[in-house]
Every structure is written in structure tokens, then in C-alpha cells.
Image (cartoon, grey):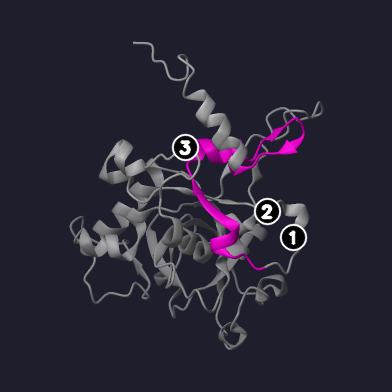
Amino acid sequence: MANWLISVKYEEFDLESAYEELPVIYWSNHAENKNAGFQLGDRVYIYVTQPVSKVMYQFKVIDQSDNNYPIEQRKYWKVKEEIDSYTGNFSVFQKVCKLDKMSLTRDYFIQSGLLPKTDTLQARRTDRNKALNHPIKLLLDFIADQFQTDRIEYDYPDEAGLENETFPEGAKQTVLVNKYERNPEARAKCIEIYGTRCCVCGLSFEHMYGSFAKDFIHVHHLKSLHTIGEQYEVDPKEDLRPVCPNCHAMLHKTENGLPMTIERLKLLYSVSLRNPLRQTFEE
């Protein structure tokens, strides 16, 4: 089993929507020799180019296909000529994990000495048959470790199915926040405008936990889903706010059947500051 690092051009393929909506993704092999390309069981990490400039996705290779590209996946190509001109075979990728971490950005790789400044991360690379100290091996080991040790998903999960009396034993369900909170470009713009401090409780992860937590924050969409349609375009300044995971979870709850708002949650939080039992620890 090998690790791979490949890239997707943000302006050509909507991987964000494809990841959300498809069970598997077909990926062109671009290798004359099948044995030199993806193999079953390989782990694949995908770097999204500017304006995201970050490794965000982990997949597992589960199959190879010589069939035509699935029609349902063609719609995610913004530049359809790219896939229409391809005549080779495909590997089938199964979704594993999706992260949003500053330590997986191209800038961080460069600052950490894992990547030369001239490397745009747009060439495929693998650690297969690489020495332990090979630069590609070191970079992929670092990326794999980030996914393995810190699977804080960009899709923020909440509890689901607790009221369902027929919830099947052993099954797992997850309710994810709407896609506008997961749009990487809108999210980045929101953080550019409002910063990374929670707009409800004021928490800064960097100041609370140290430099390794710098820039970590969730983003919350202010409008309820039932008030917007499929063609809605998010406005990062008007629609999004940075919030910590705790406040984010509370913002996705209701109070007496009414949606929670940032203003209401800030009031509840300010009242809680006077509660002597608000934060206790048992040694």
C-alpha cells in the first residue's frame, strides 16, 4: 500500500460538491503502465489549488475501471473539455476523511521545510519504493499523520436520530451543517473579514491552546436552510460568522422550537459566566 498526493484545480472541478454528493469518485490514472499508477488499497490525499491551497481530502483506492466516465460525475467539471478529451482508464476512490487545517496548507509545508518554494503541488507523487528520508516520503508521512491524529472534519457533525424509535441497531447517522458553511472559498473570506476568534464566546484557539491551534475555527451560516434555495449565493460578510465548535453546536440547536441566534446565544453565554458551576474539574 502506498500514499499519494495529487491535486485538483479549484477552477476546473467542483470537488467540494462531488465529495458531498457522490458515494465514490472516478479519477483518471494518467499512467502508461497500470502498475506505475494507483493500486488497490492505496491512500490518496488531494490538494486543492488556489484560492484554497490546501490538502483537504483523503481517499482510498477500491477499484479500477476501463469503462466510460460516469455521466453523473461529469456535471462537477466546470471545464468539461478536460474530462471529455481523456481516453485512459480510471481508479475508483472511496471517501475516507475531509479536514480543514492550517498545517495542511502549501504555505505551512514551505515554512516547515517540507516543500521547496518553487513547488506548486500540481504534480502527482507517491511514496511507493521511496527511501525513508526521501523528501516525498517525508511530506506524505507528515500529511498522513495529520489525517490520522486529528480527524476534525470540516463537515461539522451533530447528533442525529435520537428521537427515532426504529433506529437500527449498529447503524450510524450524521446530520451535517449546510454546504455554505463548508464552502472553502466563502469560509476563507469570512475568516479574512472577521478573524478566527469566536463571535459568541470570544475564544481564540491560538491564545487558549498555543501556536499549534492557530487559525482553527468553525464557520456558521446565519440563515436557516428553509429560507434559501439551490441557486442561493453565500455572502461571506453578511451570511457567515466564525464560531468555536461548542458555540457552533449550540447554534444548530433550537430553544423552545425556535432556531438559536448568535445574539440569543451571546446573552445565554453572558449569563452563564455568573454560574459558579460553569467550569469545574475533578482531579
Crowd tier of the residue under label 1, counting other residues whose Cα lies within 10 Å: few below 14, some 14–19, many 20 or above: few
Looking at the image, is mark 1 or mark 2 earlier in the sequence?
A: 2
**Residue 201: % across, % down:** 47, 37
Crowd tier of the residue under label 2, counting other residues whose Cα lies within 10 Å: few below 14, some 14–19, many 20 or above: some
Amino acid identity at mark 1? Ile
| Residue of label 3 | 201
| Residue of label 1 | 228
Whether residue 118 sits left or right of residue 11 in the image: it is left
| Residue of label 2 | 223
Whether label 3 touches label 1, CB < 8 Å: no
Amino acid identity at mark 3? Cys
Whether residue 115 sits left or right of residue 243 in the image: it is left
Amino acid identity at mark 2? Lys
Residue 263: quadrant of the picture:
top right
Q: Is residue 193 magenta?
A: no
Residue drawn at 62 percent across, 37 percent down = 264
Along the line of sight, which residue is nearer the eye, 16 or 125? 16
Looking at the rendering, the stretch of residues picked out in magenta corresponds to 233-262
Q: Is residue 236 magenta?
A: yes
Residue drawn at 66 percent across, 77 percent down = 68
Along the line of sight, which residue is nearer the eye, 16 or 282? 282
Query: Helix, strand or loop at disc 1?
Result: loop
Q: How many marks?
A: 3
Looking at the image, is mark 3 or mark 2 earlier in the sequence?
A: 3
What separation in Å lies between label 1 and label 2 (alpha carbons)?
A: 8 Å
**Residue 161: % across, % down:** 73, 33
